[in-house]
């Protein structure tokens, strides 16, 4: 039997990149997956098709985690389709880098709205659907909360908040047998990183020199860790941050 047979997982921001890889990996281990997306229906449909082509179960549900009504709809659709939730992956996130003198209220609201408020709203609604035996919440954070790169004040601030919220919710939800952990990736080769110009750049080359394992991450590297945290293999872990960085500190 696969590790997640009979389980239901919701993955936010799962139309591409790390979220898509996690959705596929959870499904490969037997979970029925809700592929949430904000704008890329085409990408989400591709993820669903990839899962169902392998005999898995998946649906796509649109919604911005920054909007409370959308989050409520996401979990109403989850309940309608599968009746419960056992795993929530808070993956939806956005980033923008700018020096201090160019920080705007709009950029702050956008990044904190998705990366922090979105995580809290999704967790709030998900908890209502967890069964009595509990389950797992997995927050996708970032190594930036440790290495604090210049021009990332807002983004790093959101991920520092994610780390702190992970610990709070681990304590708060422990009586419900819901474990809460975070994965903090380093640079990962995703569509977003490519579009931002990181992949193949001098920045990537300099970054890679600092990584003990000598390469940047791939989405599947993170997905395998998510499967571990979703399954009973990690049943004695909560409130932890797993640095998925190839050894970078």
Image (cartoon, rainbow, N blue to C red):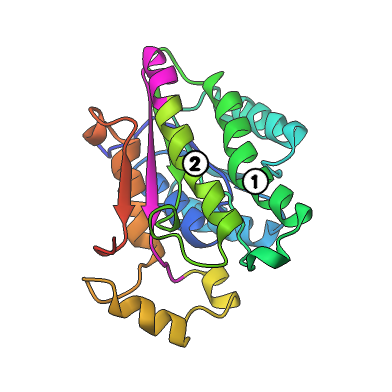
Residue at the spot x=38%, y=54% of the render? 146
User: Looking at the figure, which quarter contains the N terminus?
Assistant: top left
Tell me the SS state at disc 1.
helix
Residue at the spot x=56%, y=62% of the render? 152
Quadrant in which residue 31 is drawn:
top left
Please determine whether, in this image, residue 186 is positioned above or below residue 2. below
Judged left or right of residue 5, residue 144 is: right
Q: Is residue 36 visible?
A: yes
Q: Is residue 33 visible?
A: no
* Nearest to the observer: residue 35 or residue 68: 68
Residue 174 colored in magenta in the image: yes
Quadrant in which residue 41 is drawn:
bottom right
Residue 49 image offset from top left, x and y in percent:
55, 56
| Residue at image mark 1 | 112
Please provide the residue range marked out in magenta: 170-189
- Circles 2 and 1: CB distance less than 8 Å? no
Please determine whether, in this image, residue 183 is positioned above or below residue 209. above
| Residue at image mark 2 | 162
Please determine whether, in this image, residue 121 is positioned above or below residue 106. above
Residue 165 image offset from top left, x and y in percent:
48, 33
Q: Residues within 10 Å of mark 1 (few under 14, many from 20)?
A: many
User: What number is the disc on residue 217?
Assistant: none
Please determine whether, in this image, residue 181 is positioned above or below residue 46. above
Tell me the SS state at disc 2.
helix
């Amino acid at each position: 039997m696969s590790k997640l047979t009979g389980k239901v997982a919701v993955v936010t921001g799962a139309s591409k990149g790390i979220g898509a890889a996690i959705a596929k990996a959870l499904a490969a281990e037997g979970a029925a997956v809700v592929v949430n997306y904000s704008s890329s229906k085409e990408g989400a449909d591709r993820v669903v098709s990839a899962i169902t082509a392998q005999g898995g179960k998946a649906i796509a549900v649109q919604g911005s985690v920054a909007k409370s009504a959308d989050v409520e709809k996401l979990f109403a659709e989850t309940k309608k389709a599968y009746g419960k939730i056992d795993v929530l992956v808070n993956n939806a996130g956005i980033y923008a880098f700018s020096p201090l003198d160019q920080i705007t209220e709009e950029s702050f609201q956008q990044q904190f709205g998705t990366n922090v408020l979105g995580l809290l709203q999704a967790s709030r609604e998900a908890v209502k659907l967890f069964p009595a035996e509990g389950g797992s919440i997995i927050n996708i954070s970032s190594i930036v909360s440790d290495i604090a790169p210049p021009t990332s004040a807002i983004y790093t601030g959101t991920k520092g908040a994610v780390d702190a919220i992970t610990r709070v919710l681990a304590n708060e939800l422990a009586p419900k047998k819901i474990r809460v952990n975070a994965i903090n990736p380093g640079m990962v080769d995703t569509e977003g990183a490519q579009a931002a110009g990181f992949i193949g750049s001098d920045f990537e080359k300099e970054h890679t020199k600092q990584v003990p394992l000598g390469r940047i991450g791939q989405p599947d590297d993170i997905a395998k860790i998510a499967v571990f945290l979703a399954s009973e293999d990690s049943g004695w872990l909560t409130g932890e941050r797993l640095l998925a960085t190839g050894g970078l500190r």
